[in-house]
Image (cartoon, rainbow, N blue to C red):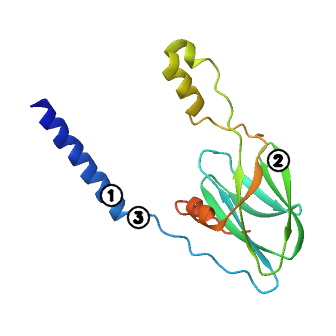
Amino acid sequence: MKTKMIRRTLAGILLIASACAWANPPTEVQLQDPMPGQALLYLVRISGDTETVTVLVDGAKVATLPQNSYTAISVAPGTRRLTAATSVGQERVTEITAQADERRFFYLLAPFSRPTGDFSLMFGLLGAIVQETINRPVAPSGNRVWTETQEPEAKGMMAGATLALPD
């Protein structure tokens, strides 16, 4: 009897979850083409890093990106310096060479801080697994670096993100 009730409950949960997913499918991001003679850079912030980041190109502020957001900026061809600045200062500079009429994609990668304490001593193997997989906060000065990615991966990252307009 308990088994039937558990099966019905699980079936109900799966039905509700699939209905929610069907009712709210992720929207595909419509990408822009670069303006003639310019390069278009898509800059993506993935969730997990809660620090708001100011984006600089060649030392000039071009956008402010909160967690789980993206922007697109147009730049002239040539060598460009991408920097993410937080409340405690600038992070590492990523140098790129932009070509006219190209579209490129970068996401901001931030290392996660290690939790204090040793969960494996308290909870054995399960604690060790949790310690390695837990979503840990990032220190404000965590060596964030812009990393290039391909269009399909970038579109996947942007699907649930918010568009932040450039400054």
Report the quarter where the C terminus lies. bottom right
- CA gap between label 2 and label 1 equals 39 Å
Q: Is mark 3 on a helix, strand or loop?
A: loop
Q: Which of 157 and 153 is in front in this view?
A: 153
The residue under label 2 is 91
Say whether disc 3 or disc 2 marks the residue closer to the N-terminus.
3
Q: Position of residue 123 (x, y in %)?
A: 49, 16
Q: Position of residue 64 (x, y in %)?
A: 71, 59
Residue drawn at x 64%, y 54% as measured from the top left = 66
The quarter of the picture where residue 42 lies is: bottom right
Q: Please name the amino acid that badge 1 sits on.
A: Cys
The residue under label 3 is 25
Residue drawn at x 51%, y 70% as measured from the top left = 28
The quarter of the picture where residue 155 lies is: bottom right
Q: Please name the amino acid that badge 2 sits on.
A: Glu
Residue drawn at x 66%, y 69% as measured from the top left = 165
- CA gap between label 3 and label 2 equals 35 Å
Q: Please name the amino acid that badge 3 sits on.
A: Pro
